[in-house]
Amino acid sequence: MTALTYKKFSLFDAVVTVLMLVVMLLSIGPMLHTLAVSLSSQAKAEAGLVSFWPRGLTYESYHSILKDSQFFRSSWVSVQRVLWTTGLSFIVTLLLAFPLSRETRQFPLRNPFMWLLVFCMLFNGGLVPFYIVVNDLGLYDKMAALVLPSVVNVFNTILVINFFRGVPKELHESASIDGANPWQQLFRIYLPLSLPVLATVSLFVIVTTWNEYLHGLIFIRDPEKMPLQTYLQSIFIKIDPSHMTSEEIIEASKVSNTTLNAAKIIVSLVPIVAIYPFLQRYFIHGIMLGSVKE
């Protein structure tokens, strides 16, 4: 009969538990405060009287955002952008990481390509050259300007490379003996084994792409093609009281920058919070295996 053993709850465990609780509260606290501000009245929010519970409960901030049809058009643009960027980034990262994870006798140009990627990750030409390149390629005011610049992520590629290098060499050697070519090895062996790290880097791409607004600000002029984050960022910038009707001025007076900005943050979090539970089970496993190099 196997005796059940219980791990003793040590002082170290108690300290770690307390620290984790503190970190959890520090993480959740700002989100609760932001939600409370977004649901509070303009006067209470501007006076700084809101902590973690709404004061003067009102939904005017969300009403100001959701009643606008442009909000839904920009949301659809952001969804398309995330789908295109994540799909292309998944393919490019996979095809880039596999050859760079091989030994130099299998891929002699591995080191030069690796140094080139690291150099591009550490140094860039800045915003003006980036704008000129995108404009000269004819991507201005097109969806491609929002997607293509974010397809290649060197940091994610290095994570996947390290994961591939951790796959037992015996699997690769046995597949080679059985006559599998590199494409068959990639899609029948490495791809199924690398789902945790690929799910993790895909989550990175989804979060980054959804929250990114600068590319929409500098490359998109057509409101029909403007992503959600760029639209939310420009809501108050474009408001000019001299061009507003009396009804619009009354409606705008019901919200403030403080409550509206809080509502923007909460609305922006909704898709990420909805996706995260489905990818969370891969997160820790993928990061650990992708970050350790033997």
Image (spheres, rainbow, N blue to C red):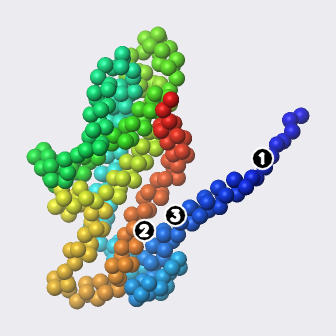
Is 35 placed above or below 281 here?
A: below
Is 276 placed above or below 50 here?
A: above
x, y (%) of residue 191? 45, 30
Q: Earlier in the sequence, mark 2 or mark 1?
A: 1
State the residue lying farthest toward the left.
Answer: 136
Q: Is residue 73 left or right of residue 163?
A: left
What residue do we see at 31% from left, 37% from top? 118
**Discs 3/2, front:** 3
Q: Which three-letter amino acid code belongs to the residue tagged 2? A: Ile
Q: Earlier in the sequence, mark 3 or mark 1?
A: 1
Residue highlighted by disc 1: 7
Crowding at label 3, few (<14), some or many (≥20) Cα neighbours within 10 Å? few
Q: Is residue 234 left or right of residue 49?
A: left
Q: Which three-letter amino acid code belongs to the residue tagged 1? A: Lys
**Discs 2/1, front:** 1
What residue do we see at 45% from left, 73% from top? 34
x, y (%) of residue 194? 47, 33
Is 226 placed above or below 85 here?
A: below
x, y (%) of residue 135? 12, 50
Crowding at label 2, few (<14), some or many (≥20) Cα neighbours within 10 Å? some
Marks 3 and 1 in Cβ contact (< 8 Å): no
Residue highlighted by disc 3: 27
- Label 3 to label 2, Cα distance in Å? 14 Å
Note whether residue 16 is visible. yes
Please tell me which residue lies in front, 239 or 167.
Answer: 167
Q: Secondary structure at mark 3?
A: helix
For residue 266, the mark is 2
Note whether residue 138 is visible. no
Crowding at label 1, few (<14), some or many (≥20) Cα neighbours within 10 Å? few
